[in-house]
Image (spheres, rainbow, N blue to C red):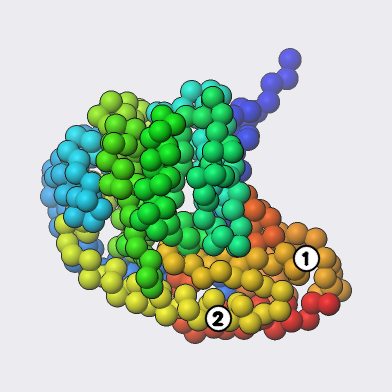
């Protein structure tokens, strides 16, 4: 009897499309091609120096050469609780914090802890590429609530209600959003939170981009907007975006004590403690002020405005203004099926491939985020590269007929 070499569970997992695009762009650059990549979701700034110095000191401390508690360094868990109260007004105890290996582990452990096979999760599309895989691995069923550019990619309570069934257990709520940059107003956050409370749902809220909002937009935590959700809300966050620490791999999960204890048990077998050196760096980050992210936000805001203006000048491209994170999510549906340099791309995936080959610009097609017909472009790259990359894109797409 021949059995498959790879389990069905793992075979069903898709590669991270954003990391795949970034890897291909870097490989082409290494081969000498002047590729400009809009794929990766990470700040182009270095980690602030005081955070790096904290890691250097931790390397010298024998305490950090040994195992530490699986749930995180006690002082870091307390600092995260303090930071959460400072930044979102949500008061939690240190015991309600689990320090994870990046935000992705927090996402996985949240769903693994909450879901049984067949439980449904409401997911607003477009969505970040990791959510579906984490839900799938936990045996959950993803139910998409599809939004588009006409509403600025914001879902309404009416749309959520339409997708509700007796199997719905969790609402995944993300604001600011990756990949669209959409930000729900405080009133919208409260309305959705009260709806979830009324329906008896759990809410998993990803707040990784909480400090990256622009213009009149305002971040609002659903945990604070609807205090009655306290016993049914799980908050996901990390240092990656706020402090330009994507490679340090420190995230966290905050929730009711029983959920955090169960997730900690899982992590104790999966990875044990997060790297102590990285935890020491994260401690310096969350304990410090927000001046570093303020500087990044100013640069991102400038680039955001430039990118949106340039994209909307391209015939056939429609790009709503993003108010958070560092992504633009333009519609390119009007360009599909048109001829460009002898080819007629029928999908945004095919169009992205053509753009990479002909214009040497790497971006992620909407298929990766559950909504074909769009692109995600990160504006977390230098001003000159951004302008050059979008100019190349405009030149190529202007040939469409």
Placement of 31 over or under 68, stated as above or below: below
Total marks placed: 2
Q: Residue at x 73, y 15 (%)?
A: 1
Which residue bears the numbered disc 2?
309
* Residue 112 relative to residue 59: left or right: right
Q: Secondary structure at mark 1?
A: loop
Question: Whole-percent x and y of residue 248?
Answer: 33, 55
The quarter of the displayed image where residue 314 is located? bottom right
Residue 37 in the figure: left or right of residue 266:
right
Other residues around mark 1 within 10 Å, as few (<14) / some (14–19) / many (≥20):
some
Q: Are marks 2 and 1 in contact (CB under 8 Å)?
A: no
Residue situated in front as seen by the camera: 132 or 273: 132
Q: Residue at x 48, y 23 (%)?
A: 116
Q: Is residue 176 visible?
A: no
Report helix, strand or loop for mark 2: helix
| Disc 2/disc 1 C-alpha distance (Å) | 21 Å
Q: Position of residue 21 (x, y in %)?
A: 59, 60
Of 142 and 156, nearer the camera is 156
Q: Which residue is depicted at the point 23% across and 66% down?
A: 290
- Is disc 2 surrounded by few (<14), some (14 to 19) or many (20+) residues within 10 Å? some
Q: Position of residue 86 (x, y in %)?
A: 19, 55
The reply to whether residue 113 is visible in this rendering is yes
- Above or below 385: residue 68: above
Q: Is residue 330 above or below residue 117?
A: below
Q: Is residue 301 toward the left or the right of residue 130 in the image?
A: left
Q: Residue at x 40, y 58 (%)?
A: 185
Give the numbered dot on residue 255: none
Residue that extends furthest to the right in the rendered view of this protein: 342
Circle 1 residue: 336
- Looking at the rendered image, the quarter that the C terminus falls into is bottom right
Residue 163 percent coordinates (x, y): 58, 37
The answer to which of marks 2 and 1 sits earlier in the sequence is 2
């Amino acid at each position: 009897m021949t059995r498959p070499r790879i389990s069905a569970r793992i075979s069903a997992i898709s590669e991270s499309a954003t990391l795949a695009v970034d890897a291909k762009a870097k490989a082409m650059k290494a081969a000498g091609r002047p590729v400009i990549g809009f794929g990766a979701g990470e700040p182009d700034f270095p980690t602030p120096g005081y955070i790096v110095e904290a890691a250097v000191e931790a390397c010298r401390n024998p305490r950090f050469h040994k195992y530490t508690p699986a749930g995180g360094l006690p002082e870091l868990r307390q600092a995260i609780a303090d930071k959460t109260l400072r930044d979102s007004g949500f008061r939690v105890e240190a015991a309600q914090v689990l320090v994870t290996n990046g935000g992705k582990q927090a996402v996985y452990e949240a769903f693994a802890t909450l879901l049984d096979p067949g439980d449904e999760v409401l997911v607003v599309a477009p969505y970040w590429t990791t959510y579906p895989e984490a839900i799938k691995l936990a045996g959950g069923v993803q139910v998409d609530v599809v939004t588009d550019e006409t509403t600025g990619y914001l879902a309404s309570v009416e749309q959520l209600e339409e997708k509700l069934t007796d199997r719905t257990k969790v609402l995944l709520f993300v604001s600011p959003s990756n990949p669209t940059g959409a930000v729900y107003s405080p009133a919208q956050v409260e309305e959705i939170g009260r709806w979830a409370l009324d329906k008896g749902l759990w809410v998993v809220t990803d707040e990784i981009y909480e400090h990256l909002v622009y213009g009149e937009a305002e971040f609002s935590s659903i945990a604070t907007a609807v205090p009655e959700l306290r016993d049914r809300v799980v908050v996901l966050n990390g240092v990656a975006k706020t402090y330009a620490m994507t490679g340090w791999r420190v995230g966290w999960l905050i929730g009711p004590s029983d959920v955090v204890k169960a997730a900690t048990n899982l992590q104790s077998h999966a990875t044990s403690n997060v790297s102590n050196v990285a935890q020491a760096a994260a401690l310096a980050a969350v304990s410090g002020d927000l001046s570093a992210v303020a500087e990044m936000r100013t640069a991102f805001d400038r680039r955001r405005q430039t990118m949106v203006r340039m994209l909307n000048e391209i015939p056939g491209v429609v790009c709503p203004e993003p108010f958070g994170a560092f992504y633009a999510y333009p519609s390119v549906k009007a360009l599909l099926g048109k001829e460009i340099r002898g080819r007629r791309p029928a999908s945004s995936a095919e169009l992205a491939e053509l753009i990479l080959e002909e214009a040497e610009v790497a971006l992620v097609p909407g298929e990766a985020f559950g909504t074909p017909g769009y692109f995600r472009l990160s504006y977390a790259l230098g001003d000159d590269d951004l302008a050059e990359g979008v100019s190349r894109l405009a030149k190529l797409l202007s040939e469409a007929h």
